[in-house]
Image: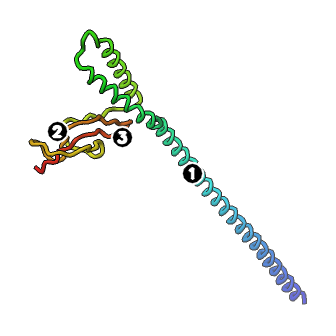
Amino acid sequence: MAEPKDEDFLDDLEAAEAEAYAAEEEEIDGEAAELDAVIAERDAFRDKFMRVLADAENARKRAEKQRREAEQYGGSKLSRDMLPVYDNMKRALEAMGEKTEENAALLEGIELTMRELVNVFRKHGIVTITPAVGEKFDPNHHEAMFEAPLPGTKAGEIIQVSAEGFMLHDRLLRPAQVGVSSNPG
């Protein structure tokens, strides 16, 4: 009967080993599930981190763009307010006419002031738009003050310049005020 005892012992041993293996597999499966959960959490944190990093970079670029625009165009209101000063100085120069002994000092003072104003404009990126008579009307840079038929011109040609226009860097401050031909052909 020793043999049956050995067989029972072997069966018990195999059952114990199988149980141990099953317990080990459960433990491995539990650790694998835990590892999978940690990896998923890590990936979620990495995704959030990358999104926050991208948002921060976009905010930095947006702030830089706004800073550049404020630097370039921040003075546009003051610039617009200075345009009538330019116009009046130009009218004063035109009204003075010829340089004579009586008006030489006054004319020179107005010319110097006008040059300084133009230099300040240039320094801050303000340039004049001076259309020529005969040039094609451009609604992006010109404002039609009137239309009139003028012999020898085509429709849409500038026939008179009433006031110069101005650009601040690449933005229009004031369109040039012009008269436009309305001839049909």
Q: Residue furthest top?
A: 101
Q: Name the residue under label 3.
A: 172
- Horizontal arrangement in the rendering, residue 164 relative to residue 20 (left or right): left
Q: Name the residue under label 2.
A: 134
Mark 2 or mark 1, whichever is nearer to me: 2
Residue type beneath disc 3: Leu
Disc ID at residue 167? none
Mark 2 vs mark 1: which is more N-terminal?
1
Residue type beneath disc 2: Gly
Q: Which residue lies furthest to the right in this view?
A: 1
Label 3 and label 1: CA atoms lie apart by 33 Å
Coordinates of residue 29 in the picture (x, y in percent): 72, 71
> Label 3 crowding class (10 Å Cα cut-off): few <14, some 14-19, many 20+?
some
> Label 2 crowding class (10 Å Cα cut-off): few <14, some 14-19, many 20+?
some
Label 2 and label 1: CA atoms lie apart by 52 Å
Q: Mark 1 points at which residue?
A: 55
Label 2 and label 3: CA atoms lie apart by 22 Å
